[in-house]
Amino acid sequence: MKGHEISPRRRLPRTKVTVPDPPADLVSRPRLLTALDDGAERGMVFVGAPAGYGKTVLLAEWASSRRGAVAWVSADAEDNDDRLFWSAVLEAFSGCARVPAGNPVRTLAVPAAPGTDLAFLATIADALDAMTEPVLLVLDGAQEITDPGTWRGLQALLRHQPAGLRLAISSRREPPLPLVRARVAGRLLEVGVNRLRFSPEEAATLVGATGQGIPSHQVGLLVARTGGWPAGLRLAAASTARQGNLADFFAGRDRAVLDYLTDEVLAPLPDAHQDLLRAISICEEVPVGLAAALSDRPDAEAMLRELGEPAGQMVRSGGTPPGHRLPPLPRTYLRAELLRRAPERTRSLHAAAARWFAEHDQQAPALLHSVRSGNTTRVGELLRRHAVALFLSGEHNVLRLALAVLGDRRAVSSPLLALVSAALQLERGEPSSAEAQLSCAEVAWPAEPEAELTVLRQLVRSRLAQVDRGPAQAARAAEQIDGHLAADTGLGGLATLHRIATLTARRDRGSAREALSRVADAAEHANHHFLVTQCLVTLSGLAGSDGDYRTMDTLARRVQARHAAHDPHRSLEGAQVSAQLAFGSLLRGDAAECVEHAKQIGQMLGDAPARAARNLGLMAETLRGAAEFELGGWHSGLRRMRRARTRLGTGRSFSTEHAAWCAVLEHRAALRLGAADQTRETFRWAQPIIAGSGELLLMRARTQLRLGRRDAASAVLRSLSEEDAPMLVPWSGVEASLIGVRAALAAEARERAVRSLDEALRAAEPGDVRFPFVFAPSDVITFLTSRLGKLGTGERFACRVLAQRRELRTPPLPAPLTERERSVLRLLPTQRSIDEIAQDLTVSPNTVKTHVRGIYTKLDVRSRRDAVATALRRGLLDTEVTDFTG
């Protein structure tokens, strides 16, 4: 380097070239560490994302696992002096154990202009090229380097591609390095926002590590609201510590979160970019062209594309149709702060958005922004012109907001708006409010109503009957809809959907399915989301009634995905699809998933008083109780099922199919636990409702088998196939065949057991009905296992069942207490002595002692007090039963 001005290396703080220590709440991310290891082999790693995505934490954890092979440089604004930058790089190399003692990079001085000193750069390249093992140079926070001169030297070094150098860079924007060339050559690993987002599992680990008491059921919502942004999750934990809950965090009111976003996310951006982000924060979706209208900047689209570059990704762009979207958390805080600081500008922006959406024939956002601009005149105009179309397209929340802005007086003075309001109330299960709105429509009814208004009134009356009346009344109301008049309006599809109820009432399901498919296709074409989902829910219910549980589950999941996109707070439709998903989960043997879906039913229904809502809620309780029973909550599950059945009563406000599977599930659980009175109650409740059904014979066969009367059980099962006693619930046939297996095994009739098992597998596999197998008694499972290799087409299904059963972690079902043990148990809380209990029961004291020992063994306790406490906890001392005979 003769002829060049040579200077010693600049002094710098040791922390600049030291791998940072991990945070106390570090969540290790093996999936990313493995990817980084692969990237090091390629030659270059680029970790690019906005502030708070854990770039430094990830690279530091990775570097810590490669001790002795890493040269670390934490970049800052002073690195725009390239002498300081190269001093730091050489100092980092000098501190790396993998660099040999005699390697020139340990002693090399820094010239006055190192970025353009080709001899200096060539010396470094040659020194690195001579190394037997490569060194990983980590440049963290590279967005701080903005001077081209600093980058110029690193670009020249990379052109030499020294064998002993691997480079990893983190930055909030793409650095001016030959990334494109490395990308094309396959030498670059990129870790961006999508990879750095925390998964729900990682978020749960982080939340648990913070110890701030965020409920586990809120983790999924937290991940959705933060977009998996690591800093957002930590800010949420801190907010919970300060406020005791997440309400302020979600509402955009937490000052600490706003300060972080302002200082770390917005501050590095130019003022024009910041102002544009505030302007578009009023919109959840920003179609192409809207940003320019809101900001009055013709270059708004170019600015958004710049903000959406992969490394920064302050804005997410793309989709069909193309548009832009702010991440949820920054948008919430930007919008809240805009409203606080500039309410007039906020209303003006909403008014501009409303005009733009109306001009582009997007009526739902036009109405929403009109509501938020406070322009009630415009809201009324849009409602009168588009309310019916918006109802059919599923924009129910927007309609509710708009009607609330108009107020009761202005809304009910229009029969159209009163009827739309009634229809919205019915979808939330509020029949009384709907009837009030219907009465207002009648008072304001015009002398010569338009066809759409007449049909809408007929549909509201029909829906009221569906929601809060009996099946016969619902069918009559549907028949009164004028199909010919409806065909000339936009309500023709909904009218057809209501009238299809008469086909299902007549059990003409084939015609009903064909009609529903036609309506759904037409509604999809017309973008009538609500009508499509109603058709899919009905088709899913029909599939379940026919035993096609795979189709039921597929359709229900389609509805759930569509439903989630509209984010309803409460609806009968959402509850109904959750009930179908809960039922499907239980039949697949996934009891834990069934419980979660059943909980969602309650959340969807709230305290809705409609008969349909009550029935759905009770269905949820039965399913949840059955699932809890199989998960080990035997007594609580039984109590839940009993409460649901008792509240259902003996009327016919529910279908016989519903009554059948409720009875089969509760009877099965009660019998297995030896809860005789509940077993008998369930049978007596079901007997008049499902008289003549196969399910009644199934329950009789179960009881006979439980009593040890295998021949009687077999006789009942034979009568099931010989008599005209159809199963109301298709999967009941699987249960009946497995009862046949047990009866045959008890009678040592192996060939009959083989036939019954084959029948059960044939019936279960098409619908994926695993529940009766997964939770079958051990004798059935032992026999099934012994038949492996001889099951033919049922072999694969049987293996899935056995694998699922092996994964269960539920405790074994406790041995039921005998009648005498239950009698003794009831007297234990009275503090009577053994002799006094013996006298009350007219038995000897030794007999009582024997029963007490049996109670202790079965309850796994060692004292009288513990026996009473355990019995109370399990519900054995409330309304549980003594006997299952008779």
Image (spheres, rainbow, N blue to C red):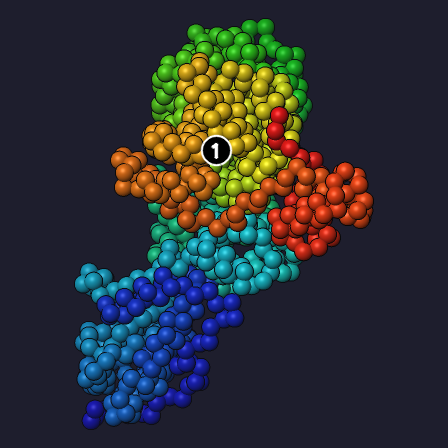
Residue depicted at 37% across the width and 74% down the height = 65
Vertical placement of 418 versus 15: above or below?
A: above
Would you say 320 lies left or right of 401 here?
left
Residue at left offset 58%, top offset 55%: 214
Q: Tag 1: Cα neighbours inside 10 Å, few (<14), some, or many (≥20)? A: many
Q: Is residue 542 above or below residue 90?
A: above
Image x and y of residue 97, in percent: 32, 86
Q: Is residue 347 visible?
A: no
Identified at 39% across, 50% down, the residue is 316
Question: On the rendered structure, is 442 left or right of 279?
Answer: right
User: 812 or 885: which is nearer to us?
Assistant: 885
**Nearer to the camera, 854 or 694:** 854
Determine which residue is flagged by label 1.
Answer: 583
Could you tell me residue 53's position as x and y percent?
A: 44, 62
Residue 505 percent location from the top left of the image: 48, 13
> What quarter of the picture does the N terminus occupy?
bottom left
The C terminus lies in quadrant: top right
Give the quadrant of residue 538: top left
Identify the amino acid type marked 1: Phe
At 59% from the left and 9% from the top, the residue drawn is 446
Q: Residue 441: name its quadrant.
A: top right
